[in-house]
Amino acid sequence: MALQRNIPMILSTKNTILKKYDGRFKDIFQEIFDKEYKTEFEAKGLTYQHRLIDDTVAQMMKSQGGFLMALKNYDGDVQSDIVAQGFGSLGLMSSVLMTPDGKAFESEAAHGTVTRHYRRYQKGEETSTNSIASIFAWTRGLAQRGLLDGSSNVVDFANTLEKCTLDTVSKDHIMTKDLALLVHQKNYATTEGFLDAVASNLARKVKV
């Protein structure tokens, strides 16, 4: 991924405390990097290094980005939420797991089940749940399926749905409560209202 994006890579662990467990991660990463990736990194002028997670998180908070953080599952789960919230909402974050050949692929909304909203929905109360991450979980999966099958129509549909979703927010200013609060907009859409607006935009772009 770092090579694809042409950015440096940092592995972050807590090997000063978890000496054996995290230390083994550090050693394995270094062995694989030296054997399989070092030459390519050097050819592109990119770097790989290990840093304590404390240091990397501090760097992440004060930097403008531009580097890839390699983290263990728990650390990655926590830090990805911090990054997503820094950009406004967990509802804007997609989560993708993919093998190097792209044949094994998982796409999901990273924000979890939004239990508070679901409890309100069960009571028949109105909700304003950001569904963008869920939409993108499906579109990323569809796009990958289209790539594997050689179906440009499927890929185009996925890309069009993503654009319609973004346009609904940025051009039509129709958004759920979490986003409306960020831009000091008093009016916001319900869960169903936002989805209806996206569907309306999509219907104008795609002829069934």
Image: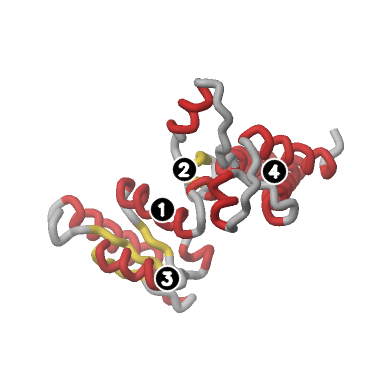
- The residue positioned 69% from the left and 47% from the top of the image is 174
**Would you call the spot at circle 3 few (<14 residues within 10 Å), some (14-19), or many (20 or more)?**
some
Q: Is residue 168 left or right of residue 56?
A: right
Mark 3 or mark 2: whose residue is earlier in sequence: 3
Q: Can residue 123 be seen from the camera position used here? A: yes
Indicate the amino acid at tag 1.
Answer: Ser
CB atoms of marks 2 and 1 within 8 Å: yes
Q: For mark 1, give the secondary structure.
A: helix
Mark 1 or mark 4: whose residue is earlier in sequence: 1
Indicate the amino acid at tag 3.
Answer: Pro
**Would you call the spot at circle 2 few (<14 residues within 10 Å), some (14-19), or many (20 or more)?**
many
According to the image, label 3 marks what residue? 8
According to the image, label 1 marks what residue? 80
Q: Give me the disc on residue 158.
A: 4
Q: For mark 2, give the secondary structure.
A: loop
* As drawn, 131 above or below 1: above
Indicate the amino acid at tag 4.
Answer: Ala
Indicate the amino acid at tag 2.
Answer: Ala
Q: Nearer the viewer, mark 4 or mark 3?
A: 4
- The residue positioned 33% from the left and 59% from the top of the image is 32
Mark 1 or mark 3: whose residue is earlier in sequence: 3
According to the image, label 2 marks what residue? 110
Mark 2 or mark 1: whose residue is earlier in sequence: 1
* As drawn, 66 above or below 150: below
